[in-house]
Amino acid sequence: GTPCQIAGLRYFLEKKEYQDNLIAVEVICHGVPSRKVMEKFLYYTKSITEIVNFRDKRYGWKKSYGLTVKNQGEEGYIPYEDNYFTKIFLSGNALRQSCYNCPFASEGSYADISLGDFWQLKRWPEEQEAGVSAVILRTEKGEAFFRKCTGIHKENVTWEDVASGNPRLCSGKHLSLMRWHPLRVNLGKNLASMEPLQFLQLYSGRTKLTPSTFWIKVANRIYAYGLRWQR
């Protein structure tokens, strides 16, 4: 689950005897978008009844931002170019407010193992088409469990290797400036008042970049790069 979900599970199971049998695995989390954004997207597409896979890798790891969807049981594919929902998610303009100051994303993790994309990886180029995952073993229990996993090619890397492409590991605040982005400030109002296509085009970046939008994104990027090396 996400880091906050793992934390909630830990608190719930704190005094339960079967917690010893639990291996908690989290994703390196970018944040969780508002469910209303997904509802807006599904309402616009109409033909989609279910999103099966948010990261379809049929065209390779680095092109894995298409959606696998279902319509009345039949599977379909929406390429990234037409995938409004993922573009909005990646923009950071429609995450839940708590995600901009997450206490569980970095040192506050309650997981045994963290999994994520190994972004900005320079080694093993031949493996990158299929995809390379970063695995962080946070506890002795997680390390012992991972040692038993077979059929996986494993290589030791440094924390800096992984964090350079995953600033969320250094701070749950790396997207904090985005909460003041004009689109995020007006998210609730725009969800309620805009037609689906109008909303999706605006929040997915299919509109002209305004000066305020540009400088907030620049400041956020500088802030994120600075946090990577504070650990």
Image (spheres, grey):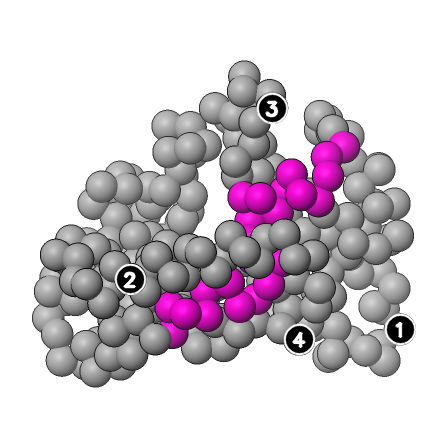
- The part of the chain drawn in magenta is 156-179
Residue type (three-letter) at the residue carrying disc 1: Glu
Name the residue carrying label 3: 123
Residue type at mark 2: give it.
Trp
Task: Please name the residue shown 81% across and 51% down the image.
Answer: 142
The residue nearer to you, when weighing 96 against 163, is: 163
If you read the primary sequence from the N terminus, does the residue marked by circle 4 or circle 1 appear first? Answer: 4
Q: CA distance from mark 1 to mark 3?
A: 43 Å
Q: Which residue is at a point 65% across and 57% down the rendered structure image?
A: 230
Residue at the limit of the structure toward the top, as seen here? 126
Is tag 2's residue or tag 4's residue first in the polypeptide sequence?
Answer: 4
State the image quarter where residue 67 is shown: top left
Residue that carries the numbered disc 1 in the rendered image: 17
Q: Residue at x 78, y 54 (%)?
A: 138
Q: Earlier in the sequence, mark 1 or mark 3?
A: 1
> Which label sits in the foreground, 2 or 3?
2
Q: Is residue 17 magenta?
A: no
Q: Earlier in the sequence, mark 2 or mark 1?
A: 1
Q: Quadrant of the N terminus?
A: bottom right
The Cα–Cα distance between marks 2 and 1, rounded to whole angstroms, is: 51 Å
Counting residues from the start of the chain, the first of labels 2 and 3 encountered is 3
